[in-house]
Amino acid sequence: MVEESRWGILYCPRNGIKSKRKRWERLQQELDVRGVHYDMVQSENTDSVERLVAMLIRNGYKTIVVVGGDSALNDAVNCLMREESDVRRQVKLGVVPNGTLNDFARFWGFEPDNDAQTVEWLSKGRTRMVDLGCVRYTDKHQQQQHRYFLNCLNIGTTADIMNLRRQTRRILWSRTLSFIVSIILKIFHRKDYKMRLCVNHEVIDRRVMTVCVGNARGYGQTPSAVPYSGMLDLTVVYDPKLFQLFSGLWLLISGRFLNHRSVHPFRTRHLVVEEARHALVGIDGRLMTTPVGSYSITVEPEAINFMIPD
């Protein structure tokens, strides 16, 4: 077992980045300057994150810091949630943003290009119990599954966009540019989906372009959501006209997405998706196995200890 103050750091290099060693060396310098005691393990691929987090937990690390993006955090959270509650409550989870998508880190003010500030904040050890969203569904093998999320779950067009964004980010490098290009590509290949949603005793039964269930800001689609309210924010976007899509893009970038006439917001603890034909599902920026049949989305209040700025 390790001393309680020692960090277990999981370094998740970004795909396609040649200077992976230099990125770690910059972070290592900030850790050493502040006298942080740590052990580092590096993920080989996305499939190894949960295995490595489980290893750190078994070896007694009480502070686990993920150097990665939303998807790596998602894997870490889902691993942590498999532990008994008394074990889970002793672990502090932190993040140094280093992914293609870093929306949950940005919610707290952690920036990918400011390691000094991030390490300074994390070294003070301040934590907050945060909520998680949880989707429960049946997979193609008729097995009951569930998956937790920190940031958001998307159904429909936005799930397509987030998948495209990951691919274009590797080419364009710019976070904003890759997002805009992905949206433009989907605008000219857009489609809507037949959905039936049950939320707050209301039934939405119509064709829908995209749905976002946000535990946090949801890449701008649930800008009022906070991961400590015990509630989930929901936005349902009906199929807008072409010119409305461009105005919606501007409102999304400027943080006023809820002002768009095609956006219908809700706040809830429980959503049932009874039907969403052929609609892809993305969770924390990564496509997940599309559920078979109906599925439900709920909130798990105060589920994990998350390290936040001072």
Image (cartoon, rainbow, N blue to C red):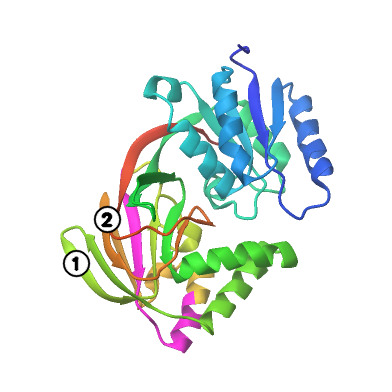
Q: Which residues are magenta?
A: 230-248
Q: Secondary structure at mark 1?
A: strand
Q: Secondary structure at mark 2?
A: strand
The residue that disc 1 covers is 203
Neighbour tally class for label 1: few under 14, some 14-19, many 20 plus, Cα within 10 Å: few
Residue at 50% across / 60% down in the picture? 219
Answer above or below: position of 157 versus 67: below
Q: Residue, x 44% and y 25% (percent of image)?
A: 88
Residue 201 in the image, given as x and y percentages of width and height: 15, 59
- The image shows residue 80 at horizontal and vertical percentages of 48, 31
Residue 2 pos. (x, y %): 63, 13
Q: Position of residue 202 (x, y in %)?
A: 17, 64
Q: Which residue is mark 2?
A: 271
Residue drawn at x 27%, y 55% is 271
Going by the numbered disc 1, the residue's amino acid type is Val
Answer with mark 1 or mark 2, whichever residue precedes in sequence. 1
